[in-house]
Image (cartoon, rainbow, N blue to C red):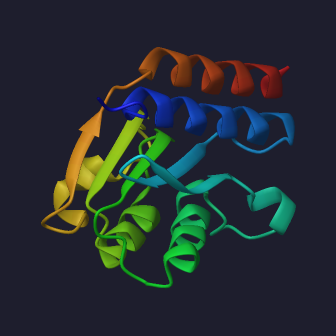
Amino acid sequence: MQIYGDEYFMRLALQEAQKAAEAGEVPIGAVIASGEKLLARCHNSTELLNDVTAHAEILAITAASQYLGSKYLMDCTLYVSLEPCIMCAGALRWSQISRVVFATPDDKAGFMRYGKELLHPRTQLEMGIMMEESALLLKSFFAARRK
């Protein structure tokens, strides 16, 4: 019986997204797991690091790679609260990650508008797990910023 499934890890990604929001960052969180083992847990840090590449996914790829001692993330799954952008999709492609699971689509900046082909050919893609929770967090964050 699997104790730590997709919903468990997506919940961790949403916790990271909440941390980002509390820090004034766009609320996106990402975790990378291999089986039931958590390898990385990160959130957007572009403001903190003054670095446009400090997306949750990029930071998670780096942390998981360091943990494993390998630049390749085969047999790993990325759980992310928002559809990755094309920069992150490119990094995921090079990491050869086995699976990407995102909560909610990003119609403006998500990579899917360019096609799943941006990911590695063997990468499996799933979406929609905890979509409502992720979308609400994003909407609340941007509504508060517009005030």
* Residue depicted at 79% across the width and 25% down the height: 146
Please state which of residues 14 and 116 is positioned toward the viewer in this rendering: 14
Furthest residue in direction left, as rendered: 121
* Residue 122, placed above or below residue 24: below
| Residue drawn at 55 percent across, 48 percent down | 30
- Vertical placement of residue 9 versus 100, above or below: above
Tell me residue 48's x, y (percent).
Answer: 85, 60
Residue at image point 35% right, 42% down:
101
Q: Quadrant of residue 118?
A: bottom left
Q: Is 146 drawn above or below residue 121 in the view shown?
A: above
Q: Position of residue 43 (x, y in %)?
A: 67, 50
Kindly tell me whether residue 85 is visible in this rendering.
Answer: yes
Q: How many marks?
A: 0
Q: Quadrant of the N terminus?
A: top left
Residue in view at x 41 percent, y 43 percent: 83
Left or right: where does residue 23 sit relative to residue 3? right
User: Would residue 62 be found to the left or right of residue 37 on screen?
Assistant: right
Q: Quadrant of residue 107?
A: top left
Find residue 112 and report its horizontal and vertical position in percent: 27, 48
Q: Is residue 20 left or right of residue 37?
A: right
On-image quarter of the C terminus: top right
- What x and y, as percent, mark residue 126? 25, 39
Residue 105 appears in the rendering: no
